Amino acid sequence: MDILAIGEILIDLTQTGTGENGIPQFAANPGGAPANLAVAAARLGAQTAFIGKVGADGFGSYLTSVLKQNGVDASHVAVDPEDPTTIAVVSVDASGERSFSFYRKANADVKLTAGDIPDSALQRARFVHFGSVSLTADPSRSATLDAVRRARAMGKVITYDPNYRANLWPDAAAAVAQMKAPLKLVDILKVSDEELPLLTGTTDYETGTALLAEQGIRLVFVTLGPDGVFYRMGGQTGRVAGVPCTVGDTNGAGDTFFGAALSKLCKEDLDALTPEKLEAILAFANKAASLTTSRHGAIPAMPTLAEVEG
């Protein structure tokens, strides 16, 4: 197994238009950043698995089937018999930018426990990935951090996306504290240019990534939207240009980027990685993200390996 992703899987209710009498119409798209990443990497040739929790309802069954249809091992997806599958309402503005409203205070993804994440699943993976949405509340917070610590003790490569969603936290200070807490456990980090100052106190890419590298993070990627990505690998830094596109919506673009990058990095000897090789991988990831951005939805918009290489 190349990559095991741990965290939230949910339904993105995305408005598609209006019906009679102006009633909004929504599409129920599969979503959740770690699940998105697992699918993106699987479509691009990696062997991936996902561990999260869904409700014993139609949405939960649908999400599990989507993982399987996309080649993701869903054998450890847990089912909560009492709490429903989590829902996010996604609004997309005229430029394709997203905003989220979450319905998850008593929903299944937050109820993930350490017992739902067995050592056997961690042992099978080379990379173990997580995000910050599962850190917003217990028991999923404790379960996720426990799994990451176990995986690190096993010698796994830990990858992290501190995917900031302001309305999931009581305040910005609480969010920053929890998002920063796992950094010393991380080998590969992806942040957006908006998230970098939350973790480092600076908007300067060189300075901010250097501060992150001081915590032991081997690779840092700062995504810059249409401008591509800034990277740091030890003392070396650089930029890789984005791939222009007409925006459908940006939902899932960052997850596609990171999933694409990890689909290549998981097959590399990280100790022998050169800047030239890394930049080729990031160019591949930028193209994959651009293709997702040019379409609508997250998982439904993610490209295949043939599309990215074509």
Image: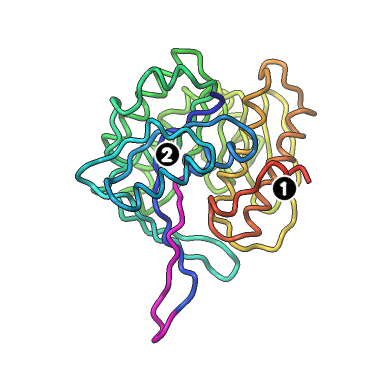
Residue at mark 2 to residue at mark 1: CA–CA distance: 30 Å
- Residue matched to label 1: 307
Report which quarter residue 132 is drawn in: top left
Would you call the spot at circle 1 few (<14 residues within 10 Å), some (14-19), or many (20 or more)? few
Q: Percent from the top left, x then y, of residue 91?
A: 46, 65
- Residue matched to label 2: 132
**Relative to 204, is 264 above or below?**
above
**Relative to 291, is 220 above or below?**
above
| Residue 70 as seen in the image, left or right of residue 179 | right
Q: From which residue to which does the magenta span run? A: 19-33
Residue drawn at x 35%, y 26% as measured from the top left? 117
| Residue 89 as seen in the image, left or right of residue 72 | left
Q: Percent from the top left, x then y, of residue 126?
A: 54, 20
Q: Percent from the top left, x then y, of residue 300?
A: 55, 54
Judge whether residue 163 can be spotted in this image: no
Residue type at tag 1: Glu
Mark 2 secondary-structure assignment: loop
Residue drawn at x 72%, y 16% as measured from the top left? 272
| Residue 93 as seen in the image, left or right of residue 6 | right
Residue drawn at x 62%, y 43% as measured from the top left? 257
